[in-house]
Amino acid sequence: EPRPIFCSRRDCERIAQLSARRLRAQGVRPEDRVQVTLPYTLYIGGTIALEGAIHLGACVIATGTGAMTSSKRQIEIARNWQPTVLCSTPSYALRLADVAQEMGFNPARDFRFRVIYVTAEVLTLEMRREIEQRWNARVYDNYGSVEAAASTYECCCQNGWHISEDAYIFELVDPEAGGPVPSGEEGVLLVTSLFREACPFFRFRVGDVVSL
């Protein structure tokens, strides 16, 4: 049975700050125009990206997914309004490149995207290379969940991931025994929030299997 995760006003403000932090670490600046193609639904990825860009001072083009704004219209907006940052899932970034080509455009030449912020799906090395090649833009991967919103991100160095340790504590445990696992080995992720007011949680079992 799904359970709601509540946020107070201060929780939302803190999440916006964390989202702005990772955008800034990926080279996004107040002068950028950010096209957000993530959903605005019970999944909060779109809202997090939007609020983070607003907190940073950037202009936001909140198109939502292809179900909200057709992919063809997304490309028309990207062509006419010239956003410089795309927030998307990896698969939809590739889908938009396909649609742009079907419409007679060259994604690498006819658009102004320089940063592509992806989340919500696994980004393989092959997908990263294909997205970067097709859009002529740098791709940054981000991790999070409803419970651990805007918690983890790549920076411009792209030499691993950063955890916002002033907001969250990440632990890994053995999925069977429940004890801690050695550094570098895979385990089930537990998250403790250091700021949540409306829905505090301690050692919440996210369920993702990762390594630290």
Image (spheres, helix red, strand yellow):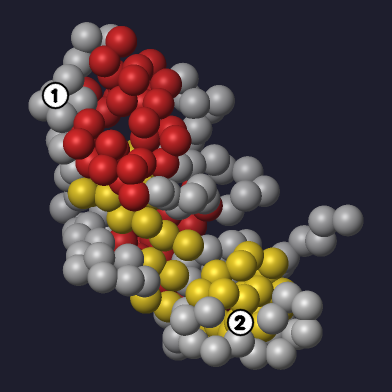
How far apart marks 2 and 1 lie (CA) works out to 44 Å
Q: Is residue 13 left or right of residue 160?
A: right
Query: Looking at the picture, does residue 207 appear above or below residue 37?
Result: below
Which quadrant holds the N terminus?
bottom right
Q: Can residue 193 be seen at all in this image of the molecule?
A: no
First reached walking from the N terminus: tag 2 or tag 1: 1
Q: Position of residue 193 (x, y in %)?
A: 60, 82
Q: Amino acid at mark 1?
A: Asp
Q: Residue at x 55, y 89 (%)?
A: 182
Query: Looking at the picture, does residue 118 appear above or below residue 39?
Result: below
Q: Which mark is residue 206?
A: none
Residue ID for mark 2: 172
Query: Looking at the picture, does residue 181 appear above or below residue 145?
Result: below
Crowding at mark 2 (Cα within 10 Å: few <14, some 14-19, many 20+): many
Q: Position of residue 113 (x, y in %)?
A: 20, 39
SS at mark 1? loop
Q: Residue at x 42, y 49 (%)?
A: 123
Q: Amino acid at mark 2?
A: Leu
Q: Which mark is residue 110?
A: 1
Outermost residue, left side: 109
Q: Position of residue 169 (x, y in %)?
A: 55, 86
Q: Can residue 57 be seen at all in this image of the molecule?
A: yes
Indicate which label's residue lies in the foreground, 2 or 1: 2
Q: Residue at x 34, y 49 (%)?
A: 125
Q: Is residue 187 left or right of residue 156?
A: right
| Residue 181 vs residue 170, the one in the foreground | 181
Q: Is residue 205 left or right of residue 60?
A: right
